[in-house]
Image (cartoon, rainbow, N blue to C red):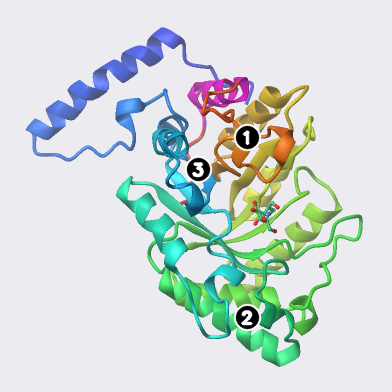
Amino acid sequence: MKHLVRSSGPRRRRTLAILPLLAAALAAAGTALVVTGTANAGTTLGASAAEKSRYFGAAVGTYKFNDNTYMTVLNREFNSLVAENEMKWDATEPQRGVFNYGAGDRIVSHARSRGMSVRGHALLWHAQQPGWAQGLSGGDLRNAAINHVTQVATHFRGQIHSWDVVNEAFADGGSGGRRDSNLQRTGNDWIEAAFRAARAADPNAKLCYNDYNTDGINAKSTGIYNMVRDFKARGVPIDCVGFQSHLGTSISGDYQANLQRFADLGVDVQITELDVMQGGNQANVYATVTRACLAVSRCTGITVWGVRDCDSWRGSDNALLFDCAGNKKPAYDAVLRELNAGTNPTPTAS
Ligand code: 9MR
């Protein structure tokens, strides 16, 4: 991206200043101008990402929805939400054939009321399965799993921007192969069966495969890459790959190149669960991820895995963009600066 000329501050301010005039002129002419987040363009994560035709989201938990500090930051900064736990199998189908969508619906309805999009997470995963599913195997488990995909994707049809259809199905380490699990033991084709069922249930949702430790070109990301290439060749419906990006104090030099090689297969890529250990280079790592997404035209959005440090599953890592009091951290400033910088390719899909 070195050849791109970054737009200067004054020029950017002029551009923003004429937007209200432009809107007024178009309104007078009877034309609707819909620019998401224009009022706060350049000053919040969501508005700045929207200016680059991308979303900036956060994982949320409904048990925090009565926390004013939390809701203030959430509603101000983000234009996409994902349920941290509320749409997982154990939450949505606690007994076989008995579905509970209350908490998931609450997240969707909050998002819709604020004009935010929703990522769905996750239809099938080896973890957070209800007890009854953990006890199944073979054809019985396969049927239950596919029915789960069909029921949940049907319930939320039309309301989900992207579904993590399958989460974390590949093994860590150097094998590049699948992780052993009860689902994997039903047959290697369980992933494509899930994607086909999800497509049938919600034809307009982007269908994603989502995983971690895929933050560069390595054996695990290459295993996933080969699966996606095979799916595209055989017409299995897959639209995107999620890179969780639970990161430590540094980031692999080929992070962006890895996103790009997936995009080159003809799928969107999304940063789906970003958090970064504090200490050392937290702001730089966040900035690098943001820059990488903006530099890849098919990288359609970034989601951080929580709002404030104290909301995070990573406890004392202080891995998020806001401190426990809801104050912006240096990492926040770095992300916003990158979102507002330069000229970046518009997503070609989504
Ligand atoms: O953040 C989630 C935490 O509240 C749950 O206890 C945990 C259960 O496994 O799942 C966490 O979210 C995970 C996500 O669903 C998939 N990728 C890894 C995330 C962090 O563990």
Residue situated in front as seen by the camera: 120 or 1:
120
Number of labels in the image equals 3
How much space separates mark 1 and mark 3, taking CA atoms? Answer: 16 Å
Residue position marked by numbered label 3 in the rendering: 57
Element on which disc 1 rests? helix
Q: Is there a contact, CB below 8 Å, between mark 1 and mark 3? A: no
Pointer 3 local density, CA inside 10 Å: few below 14, some 14–19, many at least 20: many
Magenta residue check for 335: yes
| Amino acid tagged 1 | Asp
Across and down, in percent, residue 59 comes to 55, 48
Q: Residue at x 59, y 33 (%)?
A: 295
Q: Which residue is mark 2?
A: 145
Instruction: Provide the secondary structure element on which disc 2 rests.
Output: helix
Region of the chain picked out in magenta, as a range: 330-344
Left or right side of 51 for 173:
right
- Label 1: which residue? 309
Badge nearest the viewer, 1 or 3: 1
Cα separation, mark 2 vs mark 1, equals: 34 Å
Residue occupying image coordinates x 78% and y 35%: 248
When asked about the image quadrant of residue 67, the answer is top left
Is the residue 327 above or below the residue 79 in the image? above
> Is 90 above or below relative to 347?
below
